[in-house]
Image (cartoon, coloured by chain):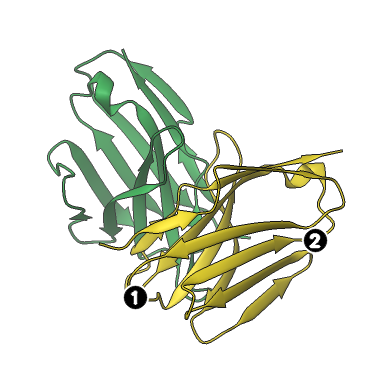
Chain colours: A yellow, B green
Amino acid sequence: SQKIEQNSEALNIQEGKTATLTCNYTNYSPAYLQWYRQDPGRGPVFLLLIRENEKEKRKERLKVTFDTTLKQSLFHITASQPADSATYLCALDYGGSQGNLIFGKGTKLSVKP
Amino acid sequence: GAVVSQHPSWVICKSGTSVKIECRSLDFQATTMFWYRQFPKQSLMLMATSNEGSKATYEQGVEKDKFLINHASLTLSTLTVTSAHPEDSSFYICSAENRVQETQYFGPGTRLLVL
């Protein structure tokens, strides 16, 4: 069965630095890979979607890469701020019904001032 | 971004009672909505896919008679946890599919505690 792993349960960085979160998966590559932000006691908020034929996508201070050879996606937050502190989830989407999202457990990012 | 609401945001009930959770997409029509469950420090697990005007599709291991889903309109899906037990205590999250934007928008979640 498909497995998805996010590199660490928690990541602590200093304000202003770049946070890099990793998402690895096994078996076959998804059609899309999505990243979400989840705050405590709240539902996930969609951030970025990257397709299997795209290498990189950017949105403001966020950057996502997708390497189907390595079966890995990297999620970067540049010039991190304390307000970026949250849990970040990656999700594999194999197309068809959007419900076929497989979520990782998430990485809890803490940005210290 | 699109807004999806859930009601109630939290509920505490006695074992054996039924609880209904509503999920509404406020600014777009959603033919398909999804129900997830999330335990502490765990990933979201899809429970079922709710299609407007038809029966829901349940994931393996999810009892359809226990988790009743109704999707009567393009903006509303409901999940009813029947005869809830303490092991049903969890964080229930719905999402609505926006096919134009190729993504799902999630509700804020409903925390259920069954005593």
Residue at point 27%, 28% (across, down):
B88
Q: CA distance from mark 1 to mark 2?
A: 30 Å
Residue A101, how many percent across, how many down? 38, 62
Camera-side residue of B113 and A54: A54
Residue name at image x 19 percent, y 61 percent: B54
Residue projecting furthest to the left = B65
Query: Looking at the image, which is closer to me, B30 or A72?
Result: A72
Q: Are marks 1 and 2 in contact (CB under 8 Å)?
A: no
Q: Is residue B9 left or right of residue B47?
A: right
At a point 22% along the width and 19% down the height, the residue shown is B17
Q: Quadrant of residue B64?
A: top left
Q: Amino acid at mark 1?
A: Tyr
Which residue is more in the foreground, A7 or B104? A7
Is residue B96 visible from the viewing direction of this image?
A: yes
Please provide percent x and percent y for residue A16: 87, 52
* Left/right of residue A65 with respect to residue B98 in the rendered view: right
B84 relative position to A103: left or right: left
- Residue at 46%, 26% (x, y): give it: B10
| Precedes in sequence: disc 1 or disc 2 | 1
Crowd class of label 1 (few under 14; some 14 to 19; many from 20; radius 10 Å):
few
Say few, some or many: other residues with alpha carbon within 10 Å of mark 2 (under 14 / 14 to 19 / 20 or more): some
| Mark 1, residue position | A28
- Tell which residue pokes out farthest to the bottom in this image: A53
Quarter of the image where the N terminus of chain B is located: bottom right
